Amino acid sequence: MMISRNISSFLILLALGVQSCSKTADPVSPTSEEESVGEIALPTLGVLTIADITTTGASVKGMVTAKGGALVTSRGICWSTTPNPTIDANMLEATSTKGSGEFGLQLSALTASTTYYIRAYAQNRGGTAYGQQVVLQTTDIQSVEFANSPMFIIGSTLAWYDVDILSSGGGAVTERGICWGTEQNPTINNQKINHGTTGNGKFRIGLTGLTERTDYHMRAYAINETGVSYGADVAFRTIGKGNMTYTFNKAANPTEVQLAAYARLQVAIDSAVWYVNNYTSATKHVWLNYDAAVPTADANNEGWMRFGANATYQNIRTMLHEMNHTFGTGTTSWWSGQAISAGQYRLPFANEMLKLITQDANAVINGDGQHWWPYGLNQNAEVTSSWDYVYNCLLIEAMRKDGMTHSGAYTP
């Protein structure tokens, strides 16, 4: 009997204890991301800000100001050419966001001169919320903008210009080149050369078939959606055509070694004469000789040139270098008495030409009793392209303007 009473009392106490725990426990509260669907509010969004508007896009920033009681699973923008766009039209989701809820996106591939309506959106388990609508007006396509650069690669019947398109005006440059004529402000209805490339940036383009000692006008042009845009009018005057001639002294019965050297030297002198006659107005006759006893090559201001057996000197570079000596560089009193002093070339026109070539306002020609640099073609390693031959001739022509002797009188 005592055992039964004790068991009964224990069961009663246990029941009371359980009942007591149920009464005092707090209800389980769902987290903000686990709340029942019926209690979730939609996210709220701040007003979009738009910057850097172009013809085809803009930078857009948005802000999720409140999650609505659940995890935001997607946020971004949607847009349309009609009001109140939704994510069913055009949408762009943000891939990252700051802790504050801010996100940024770059709109692209829009149409110029067009009105767009944009809204931010955010999604949670409750659905999709939209922010206040903002209006974006893409900019109009403008004319192409060019840099205004001088023209300095001017020969007797040909010339080159470095075009630099700074801006496409927000459109697509579908054609670009230069046009020219003898009157100011030529158009593509005069004479033109299409470079054959599109877009912005720099390119070099040449004119041929010009007349020596003639005044011309040239303009860069480019075509985009607005039509034809032109750069500034550039006036230039072609130089007189050079008169470089030569006599090639050869053995009556040449050996195979001599024949091989003659072949190399023939290519070299014909090429060098072409550069001199097209990019300088120098007048000179030279005598070309092959002499195996000469270590490299040499020349004097009377026009006598000798090339040795070393084939690495039997090239265009050396030929132009030795022709420079026949013109008076390093071989005349003009050179030692007027042109070079304290290791630098002191006369104005050649130094101004070097500044144009290098695009360095502080550039100065360096020199000694025999040679000058840069573009003096003193070593094979100095040649990086055929433009180095052109620059050499442009500087020789400028030295002629500075009074260089033994290359004929300079005539503008």
Image: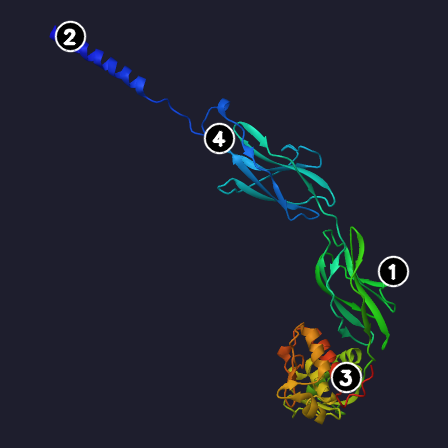
**Percent of width and height locating residue 242:** 81, 82
- Whether residues under marks 2 and 3 lie with C-beta atoms below 8 angstroms apart, the answer is no
Label located before the other in sequence (2 or 1): 2
Q: Residue at x 75, y 73 (%)?
A: 152
**Percent of width and height locating residue 335:** 69, 90
Label located before the other in sequence (3 or 1): 1
* Residue type marked 4: Ala
**Quadrant location of the N terminus in the rendered image:** top left
Q: CA distance from mark 3 to mark 1?
A: 36 Å
* Residue 332 is at least partly visible in this image: no
- Viewer-nearest of discs 4 and 1: 4
* Residue type marked 2: Arg
Q: CA distance from mark 2 to mark 3?
A: 133 Å
Q: Is residue 140 left or right of residue 120?
A: right
Q: Secondary structure at mark 1?
A: loop
| 59 and 405: which is toward the camera | 59
Q: Which mark is residue 189?
A: 1
- The quadrant where residue 258 appears: bottom right
**Percent of width and height locating residue 70:** 48, 30
* Residue type marked 3: Lys
- Identify the residue position indicated by label 2 in the image: 5
Q: Which mark is residue 70?
A: 4
Q: CA distance from mark 4 to mark 1?
A: 67 Å
Colouring scheme applied when the structure was drawn: rainbow
* Residue 51 is at least partly visible in this image: yes
- Identify the residue position indicated by label 3 in the image: 401
Q: Residue 142, relative to residue 260: is it above or below? A: above
Q: Residue at x 64, y 32 (%)?
A: 86
| 119 and 306: which is toward the camera | 119
- Direction top: furthest residue: 1
